[in-house]
Image: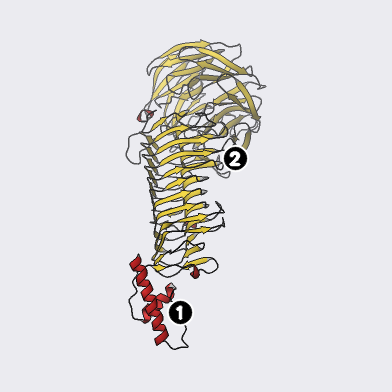
């Protein structure tokens, strides 16, 4: 470095002497201390400009508080500066020489690379915004730039530490960011419409909102990067990718992503994939302590593939229908992989439809009205309850239906529900609640209970398999415990003023929704010992014949029977229901509707022989979550978070380890994943 400085000094002195002795006295003088002056002098002397010689960047070059580099070359900082730097040329190397830029305006960008620039190097320095974090960036790279290399930087108290902003699809490509420390920024790094970029060995500490955020970006690699945030805004995440494609997060670590927000829907994430993210991989990463420091009504996730409700103009749009049954349809159920739908009808048929074309695959004549159908969690079996008072189980191999076993003469038309592990079937018939075991061949009664003379019209298992909820003709919501041998009533509630037609548990098991003959959708909380009424809404129309939860627990669907026959969607914030939309399609006395297992669709059947399928949610697909470790997801100091959650389907979630979370694996697990020719994953591939 001393030799370089000496060379520049000697060159300047020679040039100055040359100007004094050779140029005429009326010639325009140049500043030999400026880069442009040194270049002009070099050319006048007939010297070849050596790009490897560093040219000093002096404060005196600044105009209006900005130093603009508009000539290719290598530049270095001889001292700390308080000016912003704008790079407006290709082929620039800015070596900060272990010096810093310090500014005190939170809206300013400390270093800006203008649009359409390439082959830029920025290295070896620190960037501070003492008024931040605000809206400004440490380093802002504008659209259609490429081949940038950022190395050995420390960026503190900026809005975005680094922002690759290829707005409106004018991508930023092939940038390499290595060994950058982000401290106290709002977000460490943001990539928007940025493709094929690389982040290596970068570390984000105490950033307020997010570590690394990718938006509409694809084929980026983040390797050996880490995040540790502090209490921040309403949504805190380590690594986020929204509506991108083919991104890779590998060997990354997230520690202590926290938020102190109080609202129900506020969340904390280690990794978040959302929107239309596709074919992104999270491999060999560690998530430890995602935390809500305020209230247990908020939600923490280790790795979360987030489903999103369609916008109003697309929500509940009809994607297809079918009238093959030729009879009134009474019940509907989804296969766990969301490929098939089964219905029961007044002709006594169970009929299987393929979702691809909403076309009939197979049907079986049960012999009497099929009032209830239920698909087993492993997708192999279907249980039915019919007007002959029989409970029956059938197998389905993807092509044909085969009867397995029957329990006749239960004294009433059975309502059926499978336990989450697929070992048991709960059935309500006449005034009795039964639990049966099914071993793959035979149905065997385990226990029964008759809590009152009221007739139950619905049964539902809690997600953990410990409880059964029922609704009956006496307006009672009841919850029973089941320990594998005995059924015991825990609590009941008669807030409803008319017959409860349907009940459903929220995915986290903390809430129960009911629909009744008095036109109301009602939500109750359940804490393991008691039921508490929270809120109700009668926007669904007349008799609420069916209710179901979205897989993420944020929304409820309901269907009406009577004068108002449509599908309705409500949001739920932990205490209050809010009506969002009714379907434009009018059903004829809707008998049942059901949200699909992965959340994409809502299926409904009616008395006019129609099976309908509506749009509901979208989210990441064909992504791979493999060989990760997730532990200690908290809320308010309690283990009430979720380790890894699936989404709308076709994602691979395999060979992961989850521990010390209230729920290790949640909805959508196992997702079917076959894009990369892997075998279909299941829970046995993951460790708890």
With respect to residue 553, does 135 lie above or below? below
With respect to residue 78, does 554 lie above or below? above
Q: Position of residue 321 (x, y in %)?
A: 50, 36
Label 2 Cα crowd, 10 Å radius (few <14 / some 14-19 / many 20+): some
The CA distance from mark 1 to mark 2 is 75 Å
* Mark closest to the chain's N terminus, 1 or 2: 1
Identify the residue under disc 1.
Answer: 30
Q: Position of residue 69 (x, y in %)?
A: 45, 68
Which residue occupies the foreground of this view, 114 or 76?
76
As drawn, the label of residue 584 is 2
Which residue occupies the foreground of this view, 251 or 650?
251
Q: Is residue 202 visible?
A: yes
Q: Residue at x 56, y 10 (%)?
A: 450
Q: Position of residue 270 (x, y in %)?
A: 46, 39
Label 1 Cα crowd, 10 Å radius (few <14 / some 14-19 / many 20+): some
Q: Is 344 on the left-hand or right-hand side of 14?
A: right
């Amino acid at each position: 470095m001393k030799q370089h400085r000496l060379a520049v000094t000697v060159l300047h002195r020679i040039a100055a002497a040359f100007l004094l002795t050779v140029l005429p006295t009326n010639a325009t003088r140049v500043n030999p201390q400026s880069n442009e002056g040194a270049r002009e002098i070099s050319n006048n002397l007939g010297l070849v400009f050596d790009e490897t010689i560093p040219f000093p960047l002096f404060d005196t070059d600044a105009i209006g508080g900005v130093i603009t580099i508009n000539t290719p070359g290598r530049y270095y900082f001889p001292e700390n500066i308080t000016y912003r730097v704008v790079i407006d040329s290709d082929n620039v190397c800015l070596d900060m020489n272990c010096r810093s830029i310090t500014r005190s305006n939170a809206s300013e960008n400390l270093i800006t690379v203008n649009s359409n620039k390439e082959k830029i190097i920025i290295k070896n320095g620190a960037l501070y915004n003492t008024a931040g974090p605000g809206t400004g960036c440490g380093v802002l790279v504008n659209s259609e730039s490429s081949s940038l290399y950022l190395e050995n930087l420390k960026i503190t108290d900026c809005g975005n530490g680094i922002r690759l902003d290829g707005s409106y699809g004018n991508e930023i490509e092939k940038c390499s960011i290595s060994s950058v420390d982000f401290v106290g920024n709002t977000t460490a790094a943001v990539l928007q419409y940025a493709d094929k970029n690389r982040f290596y060995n970068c570390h984000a500490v105490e950033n307020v909102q997010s570590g690394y955020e990718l938006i509409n970006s694809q084929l980026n690699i983040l390797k050996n990067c880490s995040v540790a945030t502090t209490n921040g805004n309403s949504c805190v995440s380590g690594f986020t990718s929204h509506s991108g494609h083919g991104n890779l997060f590998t060997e990354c670590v997230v520690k202590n992503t926290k938020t102190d927000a109080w609202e129900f829907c506020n969340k904390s994430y280690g990794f978040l994939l959302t929107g239309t993210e596709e074919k992104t991989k999270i491999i060999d990463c560690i998530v430890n302590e995602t935390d809500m420091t305020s209230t247990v009504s908020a939600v923490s996730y280790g790795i979360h593939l987030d489903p999103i409700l369609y916008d109003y103009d697309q929500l509940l749009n009809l994607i297809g229908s079918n009238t093959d049954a030729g009879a009134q349809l009474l019940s509907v159920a989804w296969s766990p992989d969301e490929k098939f739908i089964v219905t029961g009808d007044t002709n006594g048929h169970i009929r299987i439809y393929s979702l691809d074309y909403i076309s009939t695959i197979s049907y079986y004549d049960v012999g009497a009205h099929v009032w209830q159908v239920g698909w087993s969690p492993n997708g192999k079996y279907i249980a039915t309850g019919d007007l002959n008072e029989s409970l029956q189980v059938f197998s389905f191999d993807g092509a044909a239906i085969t009867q397995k076993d029957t329990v006749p003469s239960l004294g009433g038309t059975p309502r059926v529900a499978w336990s989450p592990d697929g070992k048991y079937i709960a059935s309500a018939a006449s005034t009795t609640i039964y639990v049966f075991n099914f071993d793959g061949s035979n149905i065997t009664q385990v226990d029964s209970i008759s809590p009152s003379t009221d007739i139950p019209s619905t049964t539902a298992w809690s997600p953990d398999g410990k409880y059964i909820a029922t609704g009956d003709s006496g307006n009672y919501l009841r919850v029973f415990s089941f320990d594998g041998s005995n059924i015991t009533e825990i609590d009941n509630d008669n807030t409803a003023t008319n017959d409860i037609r349907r009940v459903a548990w929220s995915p986290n098991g903390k809430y129960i929704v009911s629909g009744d003959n008095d036109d109301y959708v009602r939500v109750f909380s359940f804490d393991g010992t008691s039921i508490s009424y929270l809120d109700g809404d009668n926007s669904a129309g007349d008799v609420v014949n069916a209710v179901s939860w979205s897989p993420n627990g944020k929304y409820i669907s309901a269907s009406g029977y009577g004068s108002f026959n449509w599908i309705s969607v409500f949001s739920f914030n932990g205490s209050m229901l809010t009506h969002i939309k009714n379907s434009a399609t009018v059903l004829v006395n809707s008998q049942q509707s059901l949200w699909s297992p992965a959340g994409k669709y809502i299926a409904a059947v009616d008395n006019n022989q129609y099976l309908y399928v509506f749009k509901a949610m979208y989210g990441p697909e064909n992504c791979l979550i493999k060989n990760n470790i997730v532990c200690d997801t908290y809320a308010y100091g309690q283990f009430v978070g979720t380790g890894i959650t699936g989404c709308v389907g076709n994602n691979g979630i395999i060979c992961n380890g989850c521990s010390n979370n209230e729920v290790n694996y949640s909805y959508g697990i196992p997702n079917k994943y076959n894009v990369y020719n892997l075998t279909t994953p299941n829970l046995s591939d993951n460790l708890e």
